[in-house]
Amino acid sequence: MELFIKQATILASNSGHHQKKMDLHIQNGKIVRIHPKLSVPKNARVISGKQLYCTPGLADIGTHTGEPGREDRETLLTLSKAARAGGYTTILPFPNTSPYIQTKADIHYLIERGNALGLKIYPVGALSKDGKGEDIAEYYDMFSAGAVAFSDGLKPTQNAGLLLRALQYVTAFDGIIINHPHDKNLANKGQMHEGLLSTMLGMKGVPSIAETAMLQRDILLHQYAASKLVVHAVSSKDSVELLTKEKKNKKNIFVTVPYLNLLCDEKSVDGFNVLFKVEPVLRSDNDKKALIKGLSSGTIDAVISNHFPVEEDGKKVEFPYADSGAGGIETAFRATIDSLGSQMDLALLVSRFNEAPRSIFGLPVPAIEEQSFADLCVFDLEAPSVFDKSFSVSNNNPFLGKTFQTTVVASILGEDVFLTKEH
């Protein structure tokens, strides 16, 4: 498909056209011309908008899929469509499938399947065998096959000795460990953030110390092993304060935050709204403000969709029995831009979705230059639209029915073009 992107402001810090309004001509999957004013090619599909931006395709760390084994929740086909609709051209999926992603063959399958579906997949291999948290998996075999990191996803590693061995083992090939800080014993099967609202609702709460206690442990282990660690999906003010101090003097520790924790707080679950029952839990307004400050200051490196599809039966039950998780890859970017685009520098905020996630893992950031492969997200800040249909098998996105001002107009990966709006 031949494309012409008309008068889009480019947001790409590695480009000579950064923050300049340009026309882009794309042909055969390549950017052939970038100029302030180009003639529209005769047969090109024109992409235009009121306040159009063009940036490298988004990248998501820790996306959950159902395939293999839980296709009732999500398939790679539906995930690829949902991702592209959200502006993502690259995902780093967690290994929490059935069976776990823990062999060379598993890694190869995900990469090849992504290529067939028009989505770059960089798999995250299992940290422990079968995700049981007992023995380390075969890291080097997975790394040699293309795994970019190792994690048990949102199943935090409770065993400190196991995590230390993992951190030490991957130093041999400069590997990366991802761990979500959450002490299950301190959380004690809590259902929401521990505070006044949880008391009023009669719900068992999850105290912030359940996150910070494990975070302090992980920081110490990271220092001892002199390894690389991604602290995944932080949710509390206390965690931001700890990490701000740690990152002043230390390298090779990185931090992600779920977009829902940036935009919502515990009040979202008032009335027992199961669609906002997520892991990590939505905390207080003060926690939310601290996360936003941490994102702006650089303490938090990347924003994640925390996409966790849950089938209808897992949500249409009473709140204490509902599964945690929310679909997010279709709405993470546009919801965050709508909410925070006026509070933060837009270029910086966008970079937390595309440049930062790749930089953490040493992945190349797509270039927006002439003769470069087209790996792009095009969005319009003034294109109101209703999110009324999800591509995901599981319709557990809490923003279904919401009108967003920001619309992802297109995601482009070579000759694979996903248009979300007619032009």
Image (cartoon, rainbow, N blue to C red):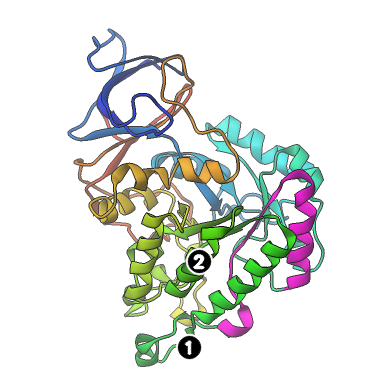
Task: Specify the quadrant of the image occupied by residue 213.
Answer: bottom right
Expressed as whole percent of the image width and height from the top left, the position of residue 323 reads 52, 71
Residue 183 is one of the magenta-drawn residues: yes
Tell me which numbered mark, 2 or 1, is placed earlier along the sequence.
Answer: 1
For disc 1, the marked residue is 204
- Which element is circle 1 on? loop
Instruction: Decide if residue 80 is on the left or right side of residue 51.
Output: right
Expressed as whole percent of the image width and height from the top left, the position of residue 295 reads 40, 57
Residue 378 is one of the magenta-drawn residues: no
Instruction: Decide if residue 412 is on the left or right side of residue 118.
Output: left
Q: Main SS of the magenta segment?
A: helix
Q: In this view, does 308 lie above or below 90?
A: below
For disc 2, the marked residue is 245
Expressed as whole percent of the image width and height from the top left, the position of residue 276 reads 40, 69
The answer, for residue 46, to whether it is visible in the render is no
Instruction: Decide if residue 334 is on the left or right side of residue 220.
Output: left
Spatial CA distance of label 2 from label 1 is: 31 Å
Q: In this view, does 35 lie above or below 254?
A: above
Between disc 2 and disc 1, the foreground one is: 2
- The label shown at residue 340 is none
Q: In this view, does 366 lie above or below 381?
A: above
Q: Quadrant of the C terminus?
A: top left
The answer, for residue 106, to whether it is visible in the render is yes
Q: Depth check: 386 or 37 in front?
A: 37
Magenta residues?
A: 159-187
Question: At 40% across and 17% down in the image, what residue appears?
Answer: 1
Looking at numbered disc 1 in the image, what kind of residue is underneath it?
Lys
Expressed as whole percent of the image width and height from the top left, the position of residue 249 reads 56, 59
Asked if the residues shown at circle 2 and circle 1 are in contact, with their CB atoms under 8 angstroms apart, the answer is no
Looking at numbered disc 2 in the image, what kind of residue is underneath it?
Lys
**Which residue is at the far top?**
42
Question: At 67% across and 69% down in the image, what residue appears?
Answer: 220
